[in-house]
Image (cartoon, coloured by chain):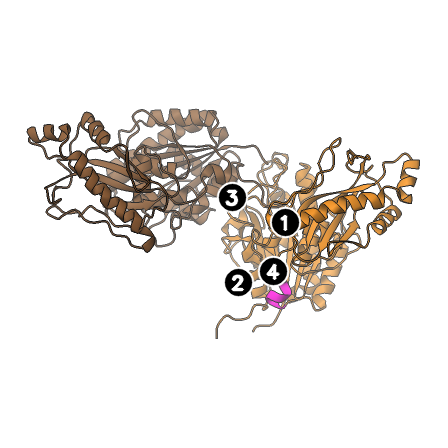
Chain colours: A orange, B brown
Amino acid sequence: MPTKHTAMLVILDGLGDRACKDLKGVTPLQAAKTPTFDKLALEGQTGLMDVIGPGITPGSDAAHLALFGYDPIATYPGRGPLEALGAGLASKPGDVAFRANFATVDTELRVIDRRAGRDFTNEEHRALEEALAGIEIDGVKVHFTATSQHRGAVVFEGPGLSGEVTDTDPHETGEIILNSKALTSEAQKTAKIVNSLTKIAHERLKDIRVNKNRIERGLPAANIILLRGPGQHKKMPTLSERYGIKSAALAGGSLYIGTAKYVGMEHVKVKGQTGTIDTNFEGIAERAIECVQGDYDYVFIHVKATDNASHDGNAQEKVLAIERTDMMVQKIIDAVGDKLVIAVSGDHTTPIEIGEHTCDPVPVLLWSSFIRPDDVRAFSEFDCAHGVLKMIIGQDLMPLLLGYAGHIPKLGA
Amino acid sequence: MPTKHTAMLVILDGLGDRACKDLKGVTPLQAAKTPTFDKLALEGQTGLMDVIGPGITPGSDAAHLALFGYDPIATYPGRGPLEALGAGLASKPGDVAFRANFATVDTELRVIDRRAGRDFTNEEHRALEEALAGIEIDGVKVHFTATSQHRGAVVFEGPGLSGEVTDTDPHETGEIILNSKALTSEAQKTAKIVNSLTKIAHERLKDIRVNKNRIERGLPAANIILLRGPGQHKKMPTLSERYGIKSAALAGGSLYIGTAKYVGMEHVKVKGQTGTIDTNFEGIAERAIECVQGDYDYVFIHVKATDNASHDGNAQEKVLAIERTDMMVQKIIDAVGDKLVIAVSGDHTTPIEIGEHTCDPVPVLLWSSFIRPDDVRAFSEFDCAHGVLKMIIGQDLMPLLLGYAGHIPKLGA
């Protein structure tokens, strides 16, 4: 086995783009000044990547499962478990999770405000969590956490659960809260528990002090939780079980934290890491360097600002987010480049002019001090089309990174 | 989801070729003047395509299943169901079909003429069909249609059928018609029904007026049908079920019509569309434009003349067929180019100098007004080798077309 290196994956969310009128017909990645990425492309290998597969438009969560080396269709658990893990709840194979909203209902459980006024203080969050703590229904434990504003997540822990149930959230005001329905016969127990939780939550929440205080202040009471996006945590090997590696995720958005945790990564917190252009790039670089200098075998860094700019149609901000990430990577290379095998890519294409994910492949670069370089000298959607990696799929990237980094044992003798 | 476009697939049958002496060492596609294809290559993406897989020589029917996005091995039903659908018979999952020949047998069922003289009038076809109408054996309905000359097709409709049976056609004169044999124990019922049909058909046909008239005119009687190419219509989702799309097939040859119908396409008839160089290219363009302007999400156009020229070793005619198709596509682009994602390719290679299908990959181009172009400036077997699509397989093409056209939902969130 060669010397072990740390594998590092830097994902600029929604990095891929198309010719952009605001940038005189080039892509944000072409327009951005990226001396670091270009040097890594020059010294390393490049290619294009269909993150899920040809023609398939990736959602960010499924895309990340693929980038982490997992079959994104077979292992995708639905949004609930990923959001729950991202919100800090524990979840393990077999558990079922939902995204949750605090809402306001009348005595007939008709939804008056789907977000119960939207704004909550930390104290209110803690009080509402406490009111919902310790619920157990038919041998199934219910774990709830509030996240931001009216949002939260619920994990059901216990035997015989199924994710094949429907939302209780009617998704419209004026409607009575929905009965969760079982989509398979195996899911009937789960639907029953979910519907019991609706009643129990209402009972526990409707008269508590925090809601009385809200009503006194003219705010809607958070007297129910609405559940949506159900999913069951699948039985699958973690990264540690598959490869024997210790892995770290540096991400700001809860969906990315959750997806990383779902495959067994540890969330390494960075003060000021957010999903915006003002995220703490310096701090991320510093923590990433510490991870490499420590005993992490794999470090995942997620930058969300590129995708936000795309959804907003803001080409200049996407360029800026790319340039700041380029500088962040330079800082990491300067400190620990000799210890790294690093890949830089996106999880999908989000063209500025479309504002939505599309199926176009993303550029990818793979660098280490020892890798055989190809002839590509710049990092862009067009340059990478000439790279030696040709066209890979997302699931190929993890084995490439870990293989070059010396973390995949020889197959055979 | 981005704006929806219509996906269009133009297949020039047997398009791929090798260096051809009659064309001073270039391929027909290189020799042909193709300003439209070259412009689409310049503005779009190109590559090579192993329609089935590396080294596998595609039959036209299996090739088209792959081009329509289906696993050509798992979903290939044998020739019978495809020919039966192409002949206008209904067929659904579970049904078993054969290609059929009218033939002449003596009283011992020894084959005297495998084609019963080959030529039949429309009136004779109708009379023979009528004689074979309404047959039901052991709860299985038998549907027969005559097609051209001595040819026809049979569909068996009912429970418990299997395609794992042998031909009744001895494929030689002087031989007694064969007993169909079951190749698996599940197929015994089907073999029995097939053998009953041989006897019933002979009983019904031997003394009918149309045959008496043929004998009086010195022509062989069509007093039996010989069956070959058995196959069972597989259980598989149609294009509509897989993708929620409405799809149209503009094809002249019955095998292509049948294969398109097998995956759930609607056959849109074009007056004068045939399998020859004299097919109505203008009319095909006009109907294709109407389909795009109407509510079709996917339009398949099949041009057979290229393959016929290849099988005949006629390089000049293959060049001409390519040039006429190029002009046809220009007409479509002029009218509805902004609404399209279009792919142009072949279903296999048929080198002029071989006159048979070979395993060489085919060139493919993918164009839309918004697609990221590669550096290729001409459409040929050699130019496309440098394209950004690299080497795809046939099954990749449908997702690429439908993905860029906005007909495949995002996977995940």
Question: Which label number is shown at residue A372?
Answer: 2
Q: Tag 2: residue type?
A: Arg
**Alpha carbon of mark 2 to alpha carbon of mark 1: how far?**
52 Å
Residue A116 visible in the shown view: yes
Same chain under badges 4 and 1? The reply is yes
Q: In the image shown, does B211 or A309 lie closer to the viewer?
A: B211
Disc 4 on helix, strand or loop?
loop
Q: Tag 1: residue type?
A: Ala
Residues tagged 4 and 2 counted as in contact (Cβ below 8 A): no
Disc 2 on helix, strand or loop?
loop
Question: Which label number is shown at residue A55?
Answer: 3
Q: Which residues are magenta?
A: A236-244
Q: Position of residue B8 (x, y in %)?
A: 44, 34
Residue hosting label 1: A187
Compared with residue B408, is residue A241 higher up or lower down, i.e. above or below?
Answer: below
Same chain under badges 1 and 3? The reply is yes
Residue hosting label 4: A236
Q: Position of residue A125 (x, y in %)?
A: 84, 47
